[in-house]
Image (spheres, helix red, strand yellow):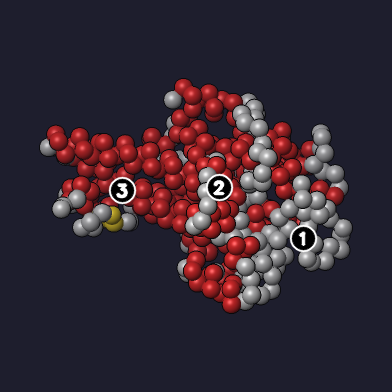
C-alpha cells in the first residue's frame, strides 16, 4: 500500500515515474497512469469502498499500462490483443477507407467484422479492434461487479463459519480481479482518447491520401506527442480539472463506444493543424491544453463506464446454477451452489 500511495503522490506532483517508451504505445506510461488514477479518484460513493482509496487509484493507474507491457508475445496472442489498441478510420469515420463500414455500423461480432473487411479487400490487422476491446472490457467488469455483489451480500448474512470464510476469501480474490479488469478497460478507453489511435493518420498524415494543408508526414509524430511531450506537460490536478461531468443517462454500450471514438476522431485535424502551427513546442500552452483535454476526455469516459458497469451489475445474474444479484442482495436467494459449485 505504501508503494502505491507513493506512486500516486508522484503523479500528483507531475513527476514522470518512468521514461516514455521507445516504441509507440498510446499515451506512454504517464498518460495511461493519469487516466486510470483520475477516473478512480472521480468515483462516487455508490461504488464499493475498496475502490475509493488512494491505493486502488494507484493500482488501476499501474494496471492501465499492462496491455502495452504484454505486446509481442507471438501468435495468436498478438493477433487478438495487439490490434486491440486502435481502429484506423478515414476522415469520414469509415474503417480504413470508403470500402469499410461506418463506425456506427459495426457488426455484432468481431469475426463478422473480420469477414466484412476481408470481403471489402481490407487487411483486418491494419484496421484494429479497439471498439470491441472496450465493449468486451466493459462487459467483463459488469460480471466482476455482479460476482462481488453476491459474495459481499452472502458473506454479510452467512451464519456458517466455514462458508463465511470462503465467501470472504473469494470476495478478496474478486477485488483483485476487479482492479486488474478496471486497469485493462482503462487502457483501451485511454487509447480511444488519443486521436492517433482512431485514424489512418496515426503517425504523420497518411501518404496514401491527399494532404492539401501540408501536414507533417513524420513517423515520429505519434510517439513524440503521447510520450515525451505528454510526460512533460501532464499533471493529475490539471487532468482532473478538465474532466467533464458524468454522462450516465440513456446508456447503450453499442452506441456509446462508437460515439466516443468519433469524438476523438474529430480531434485529428485540430491536432495536425496545431502541430503545423508549432503548438507543441517548448512553452506553448496550446499543445499542453490539447494533451490535457484528451487525457481528461479519457478519464471522464472511463469514470463513467466504471459507474455504469456497477449499476448494470445490479440487474445481472451470475454463477451456475444462475443466481440473481438482486435476490441475493435482498436476502431471498442462497448463492452457495452458484458460487462454490456443486460437483
Q: Give the numbered dot on residue 147.
A: 3
Q: Between disc 1 and disc 3, whose residue precedes?
A: 3
Q: Mark 1 points at which residue?
A: 206
Please report the residue visible at 77 percent of the width from the left and 60 percent of the height from the top.
206
Q: In this view, does 87 lie above or below 339?
A: below
Q: Mark 2 points at which residue?
A: 71
Does the rendering let one see residue 249?
no
**Residue 251: percent from the left, percent from the top?**
48, 59
Please report the residue visible at 56 percent of the width from the left and 60 percent of the height from the top.
129
Instruction: Give the position of the N terminus as an image quadrant.
Output: top left
The answer for how far apart the CA atoms under marks 1 and 2 are is: 24 Å
**Residues at discs 1 and 3 in contact (Cβ within 8 Å):** no
Q: Between disc 1 and disc 2, whose residue precedes?
A: 2
The answer for how far apart the CA atoms under marks 1 and 3 are is: 45 Å
Q: Is residue 105 above or below residue 238?
A: below
**Residue 256: percent from the left, percent from the top?**
53, 60
Q: Is residue 176 above or below residue 259?
A: above
**Residue 223: percent from the left, percent from the top?**
71, 44
**Residue 205: percent from the left, percent from the top?**
78, 57
Image-quadrant location for residue 97: bottom right
Within 10 Å of disc 3 (Cα), the crowding (few <14, some 14-19, many 20+) is many
Q: How many labels does the image show?
A: 3
User: What secondary structure is found at the residue carrying circle 3?
Assistant: helix
Q: Residue furthest bottom?
A: 119
User: What secondary structure is found at the residue carrying circle 1?
Assistant: loop
User: What secondary structure is found at the residue carrying circle 2?
Assistant: loop
The one of 68 and 37 positioned closer to us in this rendering: 68
Q: Give the numbered dot on residue 334.
A: none
Amino acid at each position: 500500500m505504501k508503494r502505491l500511495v507513493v506512486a500516486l503522490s508522484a503523479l500528483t506532483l507531475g513527476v514522470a515515474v518512468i521514461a516514455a517508451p521507445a516504441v509507440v504505445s498510446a499515451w506512454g506510461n504517464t498518460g495511461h497512469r493519469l487516466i486510470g488514477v483520475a477516473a478512480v479518484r472521480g468515483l462516487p460513493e455508490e461504488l464499493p469502498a475498496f475502490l475509493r482509496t488512494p491505493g486502488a487509484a494507484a493500482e488501476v493507474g499501474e494496471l492501465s499500462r499492462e496491455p502495452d507491457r504484454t505486446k509481442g508475445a507471438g501468435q495468436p496472442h498478438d493477433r487478438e490483443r495487439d490490434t486491440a489498441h486502435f481502429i484506423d478510420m478515414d476522415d469520414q469515420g469509415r474503417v480504413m477507407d470508403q470500402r469499410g463500414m461506418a463506425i456506427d455500423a459495426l457488426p455484432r461480432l468481431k469475426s463478422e467484422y473480420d469477414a466484412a473487411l476481408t470481403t471489402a479487400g481490407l487487411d483486418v490487422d491494419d484496421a484494429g479492434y479497439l471498439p470491441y476491446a472496450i465493449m468486451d472490457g466493459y462487459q467483463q467488469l459488469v460480471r466482476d461487479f455482479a460476482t462481488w455483489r453476491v459474495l459481499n451480500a452472502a458473506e454479510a448474512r452467512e451464519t456458517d463459519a466455514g462458508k463465511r470464510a470462503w465467501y470472504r476469501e473469494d470476495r478478496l480474490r474478486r477485488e483483485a480481479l476487479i482492479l486488474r479488469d478496471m486497469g485493462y478497460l482503462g487502457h483501451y478507453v485511454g487509447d480511444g482518447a488519443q486521436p492517433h489511435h482512431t485514424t489512418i493518420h496515426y503517425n504523420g498524415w497518411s501518404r496514401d491520401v491527399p494532404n492539401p494543408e501540408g501536414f507533417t508526414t513524420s513517423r515520429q509524430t505519434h510517439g513524440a506527442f503521447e510520450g515525451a511531450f505528454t510526460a512533460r506537460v501532464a499533471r493529475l490536478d490539471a487532468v482532473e480539472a478538465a474532466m467533464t461531468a458524468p454522462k450516465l443517462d440513456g446508456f447503450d454500450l453499442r452506441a456509446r463506444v462508437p460515439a466516443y471514438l468519433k469524438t476523438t476522431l474529430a480531434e485529428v485535424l485540430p491536432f495536425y493543424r496545431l502541430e503545423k502551427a508549432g503548438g507543441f513546442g517548448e512553452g506553448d500552452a496550446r499543445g499542453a491544453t490539447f494533451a490535457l483535454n484528451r487525457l481528461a476526455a479519457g478519464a471522464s469516459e472511463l469514470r463513467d463506464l466504471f459507474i455504469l458497469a456497477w449499476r448494470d451489475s445490479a440487474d445481472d445474474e451470475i454463477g451456475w446454477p444462475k443466481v440473481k444479484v438482486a435476490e441475493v442482495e435482498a436476502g431471498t436467494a442462497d448463492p452457495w451452489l452458484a458460487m462454490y459449485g456443486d460437483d
